[in-house]
Image (tube, grey):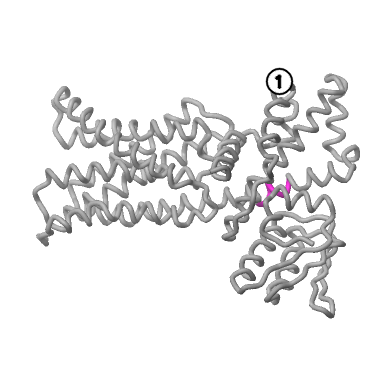
């Protein structure tokens, strides 16, 4: 098959599918989990990774004396996935990713950025111009890079609900490297590679999306209900009859009364902040835009003050009552982002 | 226990707890609403995420048609929930 492509055709086949694949999940993000600036940042980082990867791979290829195929199977997947994992891992480590869903979108964006730059390089240097070559190079590689980075980010996020460990990095990275190496192995059979990529990766992305969507829905549903019930119990004055009241009463043996009062204030404030984030997402999901409470900065400052006052021990005993800890840093990023947007 | 009835003047009267179990009943009643509709929430004690989501979806639909939901008689606790969640700014509260 030697369907000649003019330079414009090559550019379209090489670059446009990447952006289309990236636009898909982003357009489905009705709740605004991922802001456009963050996607652009991820694309840029991916592009920089491709440039660094090019230099590192060339260096390692020269030093190792390996064949091109051997290098593509054993070394390139490791260097490239490691580089992309730096940004994706940073997003997860610093809790800038709250769910599997935004992790999948941002991970895919990093891979898309990588593939965009890589494809520009191949546009310059690959002189065969038939459609098949560009379908594999342009579309196949882009989907593979996006898919492996999304897979890495989702695995890392999913494996570490209570904090990242080294083994989580190892497992997520190993999965991404294996998939990448498998794709490179197929590059000697371009038709098979294209078919496999076009069949497997969209299915993988849909699965990741569905999994992520379930997580967000659960967080919005049962999580919000927990906050609403907590606020209702506190507002109704029935707290002493509730299990939470009994638990707090039990703490008075080990903590001074003002500290227990601070704990109750913190529980209430945190439930309120949760409600602000969840309510905002629920409205956006329905195409509506709510306003932030004007006293939000004061509430956030009060939460930080109470957390400092209670210390690590106080927060640990509160852990069974407030299950916000794993997403708290992410919520904090979200609230600050909304405040910035509101103020601008 | 949740109850939703329609007055002779078209006002929908909500009472009890609008939680996930009651959301289907409320959805059925709100599906037939068009134009601007008053929801009398004087007897409403509690609203869960399913209820909030339902109100948001209905408001979106009615706004697109040039109408809206107007909520009256929210108790202080529910008013606070609406204020915090941002719902206060997308609904007319009386």
Residue at 22% across, 56% down: A13
The chain letter under disc 1 is A
Asked whether B27 or B11 is in front, the reply is B11
Quick one: SS at disc 1?
Answer: helix
Q: Is residue A239 above or below residue A250?
A: below
| Rendered image quadrant of residue A54 | top left
Q: How crowded is mark 1: few (under 14 residues within 10 Å), some or many (20 or more)?
A: few
Instruction: From the image, tell me which residue sits under label 1.
Output: A311
Position of B71 with respect to A325 (left or right) is right
- Return the residue found at the far front: A344
* Numbered range of the magenta stretch: A221-226
The x and y percentages for residue A18 are 31, 51
Residue at 45% across, 31% down: A90
Residue at 14% across, 32% down: A67
The x and y percentages for residue A247 are 83, 31
Q: In this view, does B50 lie above or below B12?
A: above
Q: Main secondary structure of the magenta part?
A: helix
Position of B8 with respect to A72 (left or right) is right
Residue at 86% across, 62% down: B42
The x and y percentages for residue A169 are 44, 30
Q: In this view, does A212 lie above or below A333?
A: below
Position of B82 with respect to A260 (left or right) is left
């Amino acid at each position: 098959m030697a369907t000649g492509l003019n330079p414009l055709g090559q550019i379209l086949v090489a670059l446009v599918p990447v952006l289309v694949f990236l636009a898909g999940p982003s357009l489905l993000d009705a709740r605004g989990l991922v802001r456009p600036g963050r996607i652009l940042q991820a694309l840029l980082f991916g592009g920089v990774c491709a440039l660094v990867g090019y230099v590192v791979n060339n260096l390692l290829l020269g030093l190792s004396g390996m064949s091109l195929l051997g290098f593509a199977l054993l070394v390139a997947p490791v260097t490239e996935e490691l580089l992309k994992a730096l940004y994706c891992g940073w997003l997860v480590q610093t809790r800038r990713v709250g769910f599997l869903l935004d992790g999948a979108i941002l991970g895919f964006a990093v891979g898309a950025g990588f593939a965009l730059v890589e494809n520009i390089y191949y546009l310059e240097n690959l002189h065969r111009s038939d459609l098949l070559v560009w379908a594999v190079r342009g579309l196949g590689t882009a989907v593979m890079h996006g898919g492996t980075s999304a897979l890495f980010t989702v695995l890392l996020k999913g494996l570490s609900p209570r904090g990242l460990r080294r083994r989580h990095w190892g497992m997520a990275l190993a999965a991404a490297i294996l998939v990448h190496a498998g794709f490179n192995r197929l590059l000697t059979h371009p038709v098979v590679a294209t078919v496999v990529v076009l069949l497997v990766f969209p299915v993988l992305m849909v699965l990741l999306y569905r999994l992520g969507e379930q997580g967000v829905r659960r967080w919005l549903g049962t999580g919000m209900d927990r906050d609403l019930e907590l606020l209702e119990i506190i507002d109704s004055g029935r707290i002493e009859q509730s299990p939470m009241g009994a638990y707090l009463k039990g703490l008075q043996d080990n903590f001074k009364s003002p500290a227990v009062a601070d704990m109750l204030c913190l529980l209430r404030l945190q439930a309120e902040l949760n409600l602000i984030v969840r309510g905002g997402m629920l409205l956006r999901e329905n195409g509506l835009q709510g306003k932030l409470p004007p006293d939000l900065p004061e509430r956030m400052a009060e939460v930080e003050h109470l957390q400092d006052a209670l210390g690590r021990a106080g927060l640990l005993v509160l852990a069974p009552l407030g299950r916000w800890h794993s997403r708290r840093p992410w919520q904090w990023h979200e609230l600050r982002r909304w405040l910035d947007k509101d103020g601008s | 226990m949740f109850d939703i009835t329609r007055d002779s003047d078209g006002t929908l009267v909500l009472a009890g707890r609008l939680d996930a179990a009651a959301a289907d009943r409320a959805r059925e009643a709100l599906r037939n609403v068009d134009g601007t509709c008053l929801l009398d929430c004087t007897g409403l004690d509690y609203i869960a995420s399913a209820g909030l989501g339902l109100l948001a979806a209905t408001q979106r639909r009615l706004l697109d048609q040039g109408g809206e939901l107007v909520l009256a008689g929210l108790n202080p606790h529910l008013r606070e929930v609406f204020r915090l969640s941002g719902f206060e700014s997308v609904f007319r509260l009386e």
